[in-house]
Image (spheres, rainbow, N blue to C red):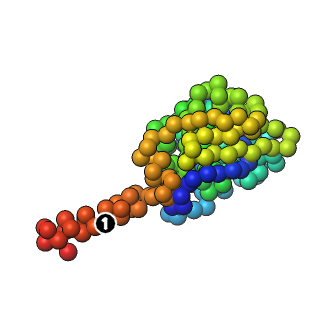
Amino acid sequence: MKPFVRETGRVAVLDRPDVDTDQIVPKQFLKRIDRTGFGAYLFYDQRHDEDGDPLPGFPLDRPEFADAKVLLTGRNFGCGSSREHAAWALQDFGFDVVIAPSFGDIFRTNASKIGMLVVELPEQEVKQMMESVNLDTGSEVTVDLERGVIVAPDGREVPFAIDEAVRHRLLNGLDDIGLTLQHEDEIAAYERSHGIG
């Protein structure tokens, strides 16, 4: 997992509440065994017709949002079933950060385990950020995990809080195996003292 310290990039806006994991990546794509390639299926049912042809008008397909690294979205994002694939699809599509007023708890956990930062801000703050995005030319934001601030499209610095264990994991690029390996010496000592291995 690559460390997340700071990201400056284009921002996309999906101003919708209660986006569940089935919308993010529909069930018909959960049969894949690889963790990669899910970006092609992000919001598939909302972006394609029954024949798989692209539908016009989905917000993330706006040219101003092309190659966005940061997603601004509505409250309760990632609610619904426990579907790791939802976080995988967002990351594979190119998002490193999702900012919303609230998140589904399981989605938040799944995102942090793959190196994606989710930032919870007051709803009014998210709305103000959305309104500051230039919908004609696009906008950039900077998300600085080290300092705990977002530089919004209008130049304001917006502080955010994050669980310290998640912050440590992201700053150091540690997945679950990496976290465990931080204690490799203690594990080896325990195994020796108990005649294991």
Q: Nearer the viewer, residue 13 or 21?
A: 13
Residue at 31% x, 66% y: name it. 184
Residue 49 location in percent, x, y?
73, 46
Is 113 displayed left or right of 72 in the figure? left
Q: Which of the 4 image quadrants contains residue 19?
A: top right
Asked if 12 appears above or below 113 in the picture, the reply is above
Q: For the residue marked with disc 1, what is the amino acid?
A: Glu
Residue at 62% across, 57% down: 92
Left or right of 34, for residue 73: right
Q: Is residue 133 left or right of residue 5?
A: right
Give the residue number, with chain letter if any, for mark 1. Answer: 184
Where is residue 87? Give x, y as percent.
55, 49
Q: Nearer the viewer, residue 188 or 110?
A: 188
Which quadrant: the C terminus?
A: bottom left
> What residue do we see at 61% from left, 51% from top?
6
Graded by Cα atoms within 10 Å as few (under 14), some (14 to 19) or many (20 or more), the crowding at tag 1 reads: few
Does dot 1 land on a helix, a strand or a loop? helix
> Residue reaching furthest left?
194
Q: Residue furthest top?
A: 124
Q: Quadrant of residue 78?
A: top right
**Quadrant position of residue 62:** top right
Q: Is residue 53 visible?
A: yes
Q: Can you give x and y, in whole percent of width and height, for residue 14 in the image?
A: 69, 37
Which residue reaches farthest bottom?
197
- Tell me what residue is drawn at x 41 percent, y 46 percent: 165
Relative to 37, residue 106 above or below: above
Looking at the picture, tell me which residue is in the foreground, 75 or 36: 75
Pick the residue in front: 111 or 183: 183
Q: Residue furthest right?
A: 136
Q: 151 above or below 101?
A: below
- Whole-percent x, y for residue 163 in the image: 45, 41
Q: In this view of the protein, can residue 46 be seen by the observer? A: no
